[in-house]
Image: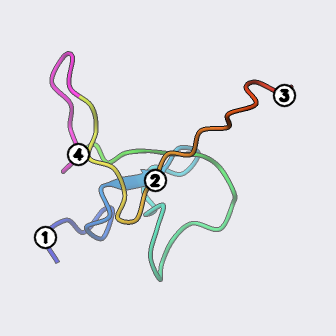
Amino acid sequence: MKCTLCENSGWVCEAHPQMPWDGPNACACGAAGMPCPWCNRLAKGDEPRMPQGFGTEFDKEGWRH
């Protein structure tokens, strides 16, 4: 394991940044994830490394809220 904070997922819990957001030891609080400050740091204008299996879905019907 390269990063012990996020357990190589690249993401930590936004409410509990000391816990990984994904994986067997993931935080179960339900908060959003945020890029790991140790291994998924961003330079200005860069996008974070996304979690494995991440996919974007588009709804052709548009915004429904």
Give the residue furthest to the bottom.
24
Residue at image point 21% right, 31% down:
42
Q: Disc number at residue 40?
A: 4
The quarter in which the C terminus is drawn is top right
- In this picture, which residue range is highlighted in magenta? 38-46
Q: Amino acid at mark 3?
A: Arg
Give the Cα separation between the discs numbered 2 and 3. 20 Å
Check disc 3 and report its element: helix, strand or loop: loop
Query: For residue 40: magenta?
Result: yes
> x, y percentage for residue 47?
27, 31
The image quarter in which residue 6 lies:
bottom left
Q: Amino acid at mark 4?
A: Asn
Give the Cα separation between the discs numbered 1 and 3. 41 Å
Mark 2 vs 4, N-terminal side? 4
Q: Amino acid at mark 2?
A: Gly
The quarter in which the N terminus is drawn is bottom left
Mark 4 vs 3, N-terminal side? 4
Give the Cα separation between the discs numbered 2 and 1. 24 Å
Residue density around tag 4, few if under 14, some if 14–19, many if 20 or more, within 10 Å? many
Q: Amino acid at mark 1?
A: Lys
Residue picked out by circle 2 = 55
Q: Disc number at residue 64?
A: 3
Query: For residue 29: magenta?
Result: no
- Foreground: 13 or 43? 43
